[in-house]
Image: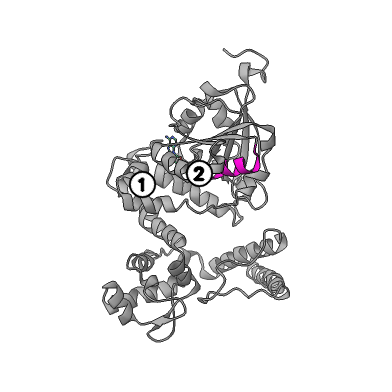
Amino acid sequence: MNRISELSAAIAKHTATIDGYFTSNGLPTPSLEADALWNLPIPDGATDIKQARVAVIEACSELRDLMTGPKELLKFEWTAYVSVKVILRFRLDQSFPVGESTTFEAMSQYSGLSAKQVRRFVKHAILNHRLFQEKSPGVITHSALTAVLASEEIARNAFVVQLDEFWPAGIRVADALEKWPGSEENNETGFSLVNNSSKSLYDILAADPVRNARFGMLFNRPDEPLDLIIENYPWQDFNSVVDVGGSHGAVAIAIAEKFPHMKCIVQDLPETVKEGAARLPVKLEDRVEFMVQDFFTPQRITADVYYLRSILHNWSDKYCIKILQNLVPALKNGSRIIIHERVLPDVDQLAGVDAKPAINLDIGMLQLLNAQQREMHEWPALLQRADHRFQFLGAKKPDGAIRWICEAVWIEGDERRGFPAQ
Ligand SMILES: C[S@@+](CC[C@H](N)C(=O)[O-])C[C@H]1O[C@@H](n2cnc3c(N)ncnc32)[C@H](O)[C@@H]1O
């Protein structure tokens, strides 16, 4: 069988598996109509159905490319997201309720754009992105995608931030690499260039409350259940944890709730600490403490565990080493360091659809901050560069998790190597 027939057969086979699952469980078939479910109803435990879904997506993508052909694949869609940006900026998705219809004229009155402009952008968005539908000429209804955008501010905000802040930064990455070869500084990026600034993303956004609030909202929704870190680390074996750059303390609070013997300290910058402390449930006040601590200054708290979730991927190696070295003054023999973040897949896993978000985030970290995602082998090396007394113990990724739990231990006197520390 040739490749296109193989792919076509695979698509038919795996689609039938998924269809059978939905039918036998009384679940609706996937749809992009406005009243569709927002996510496919496949529970975490249904591993074979999840795998079938991945197989369909991968086979469709390859088949589509094969049927397009190499030369046509090289055509660049340079208008790709223009219509989406306009729709979001002028809030056309929010111009009429989900379940109702509208016209180009009504959208024009709502937005201040001309009816002709609205028609051009809406048609582009329907064709390229399945935003809206036009089932009869001039009558516009929502699709599932615009229904989500119109109904859920967090999803809408994420799209806006990606289009308005992240995408333009990507366009200047090559320029930044040319201007600052090999830079590890977070103010020498595509983001800095496109903002015409010598500052970092954090400083640029901090100067603009609206942009800063939109950026902050990106992190308001948990991207994986907290249970995954609570259930998959032996917290019961320890008495204290410092959540380094812990934001509003979601993880520390979950640890304190589940393990009443634990003392948790959440460290962050002043503004975040103030907000986090204000939100802390009164019943946890004696066991969860918020503390201002810049992680580029020496750590003041000696604890059993130092927990860093999604911290190091925001920094280049040079700064990660400084963050780790600044823990050293407080560490005691046996202190644990948990690095909890996405890990880049190995080269042999690059084909999987799961690899794509990690690889894309890696480039994203570069375009915004000159930072990076890391492969597993880079963690022990980075820890060793910070201090040879950090010993990497291993890592695991619980089922259903997006982050790995990477663990290191601090060994005083370099017992591991059998000679005293210098
Ligand atoms: C990507 S967020 C991760 C927050 C949290 N660990 C989590 O996973 O939800 C990075 C955090 O680092 C904090 N941060 C940035 N620079 C810092 C610094 N120099 N010292 C302490 N915290 C810092 C930010 O305020 C933010 O809360």
Picture quadrant where residue 381 is located = top right
The magenta span reads 249-260
> Which residue in the structure is indicated by mark 1?
190
Q: Position of residue 189 (x, y in %)?
A: 36, 43
Describe residue 319's horizontal placement relative to residue 37 as left or right: left
* Upstream in sequence: badge 1 or badge 2: 1
Among all residues in the image, which is located at the extreme front? Answer: 282
Q: Quadrant of the N terminus?
A: bottom right
Asked if residue 186 lies left or right of residue 263, the reply is left
Of the numbered discs in the image, which one, if any, rests on residue 280?
Answer: 2
Mark 1 crowd level (few <14, some 14–19, many ≥20, 10 Å Cα): many
Measured Cα–Cα span from mark 1 to mark 2: 37 Å
The relative height of residue 178 versus residue 115 in the rendered view (above or below) is above
Amino acid type of disc 1?
Answer: Gly
**Vertical position of residue 143 compared to residue 242: above or below:** below
Judging depth in this view, the residue of 239 and 73 nearest the camera is: 239
